[in-house]
Image (tube, rainbow, N blue to C red):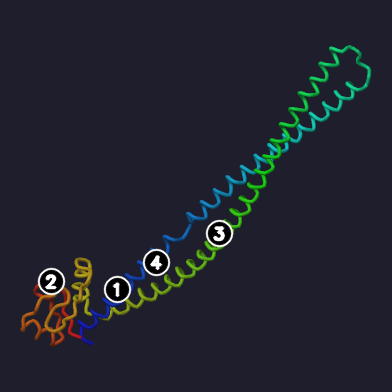
């Protein structure tokens, strides 16, 4: 095999390595936390907190109502016991019972409102919770798939690098030196020649250059410097 063809094949391997490396870094950047999962978790936490607060408020209200009912019962018991004879005292007591009952009614209304809010918050927590579970499961599957893809890609890259090493060792070191330098400078070191045109720079090549290239010798394009390859 001519040295130019060897260089061209080396370039094919290098381009394949490059493209796999790009894919690998793209996949690697997708590993880790997922914004949608993090956001759903934050939403769930805040809704759970709101639910806890409401339940606490509901319990406090119930406790306060119980307390008032005990007071009302005691006051009414006193009011109808016949033990209090003084009309002014009786009127005051009756007034106190009325106030306590009004307060109890007010609290009962509030407790009912809170109960509605608790039910709504419970539904929210359930919905957000199942959304979070779904997103997390999807993310988990994705991460597993991603890890598997990354593993496969790494092993493919390792094979390609071995191949590259073996191939480049078989090529004339001077030619490899020219190739490596051009790869660094231009990205593409070997350019195909099609219809007398260098595909690296799209310039028509002089006849003498074409003749030399056709003979299989290492010839560099007089315009762009790339190694000319006639397939
Ligand atoms: Zn050229």
- Mark 2 — residue? 224
Check disc 2 and report its element: helix, strand or loop.
loop
Which sits in the foreground, 129 or 9?
129
Q: Are marks 3 and 2 in contact (CB under 8 Å)?
A: no
C-alpha separation, residue under disc 1 versus residue under disc 2: 19 Å
Residue at numbered disc 3: 136
Relative horizontal placement of residue 103, taking residue 44 as reference (left or right):
right
Query: Marks 1 and 4, how far apart in space?
Result: 14 Å
Q: First in sequence, mark 3 or 2: give its number.
A: 3
Circles 4 and 2: CB distance less than 8 Å?
Answer: no
Marks 4 and 2, the one that precedes in the sequence: 4
Distance CA(mark 3)–CA(mark 2): 53 Å
Question: Which mark is first along the chain, 4 or 1?
Answer: 1
- State the separation of the CA atoms marked 4 and 2: 31 Å
**In front: mark 1 or mark 3?**
3
**How far is the residue under mark 4 from the one under mark 3?**
23 Å
Q: Quadrant of residue 109?
A: top right
| Between 50 and 66, the one nearer to me in the picture | 66
Q: Is residue 92 above or below residue 15?
A: above
Q: How dense is the environment of label 2, judged by Cα within 10 Å: few (below 14), some, or many (20 and up)? A: some
Label 3 Cα crowd, 10 Å radius (few <14 / some 14-19 / many 20+) = some
Q: Which residue is mark 4?
A: 24
Q: What label sits on residue 15 in the rendered view?
A: 1
Q: Secondary structure at mark 3?
A: helix
């Amino acid at each position: 095999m001519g040295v130019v063809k060897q260089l061209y094949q080396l370039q094919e391997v290098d381009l394949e390595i490059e493209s796999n490396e790009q894919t690998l870094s793209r996949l690697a950047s997708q590993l880790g936390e997922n914004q949608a999962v993090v956001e759903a978790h934050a939403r769930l936490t805040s809704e759970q907190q709101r639910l806890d607060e409401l339940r606490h408020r509901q319990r406090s209200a119930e406790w306060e109502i119980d307390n008032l009912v005990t007071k009302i019962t005691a006051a009414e018991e006193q009011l109808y016991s016949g033990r209090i004879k003084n009309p002014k005292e009786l009127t005051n007591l009756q007034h106190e019972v009325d106030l306590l009952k009004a307060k109890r009614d007010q609290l009962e209304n509030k407790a009912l409102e809170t109960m509605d809010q608790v039910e709504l918050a419970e539904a929210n927590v359930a919905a957000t919770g199942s959304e979070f579970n779904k997103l997390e499961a999807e993310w988990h599957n994705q991460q597993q798939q991603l890890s598997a893809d990354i593993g496969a890609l790494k092993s493919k890259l390792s094979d390609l690098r071995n191949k590259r090493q073996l191939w480049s060792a078989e090529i004339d070191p001077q030619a490899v030196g020219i190739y490596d330098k051009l790869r660094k400078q231009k990205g593409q070191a070997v350019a195909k020649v099609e219809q007398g045109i260098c595909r690296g720079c799209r310039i028509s090549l002089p006849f003498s250059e074409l003749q030399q290239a056709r003979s299989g010798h290492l010839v560099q394009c007089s315009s762009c410097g790339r190694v000319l390859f006639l397939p």
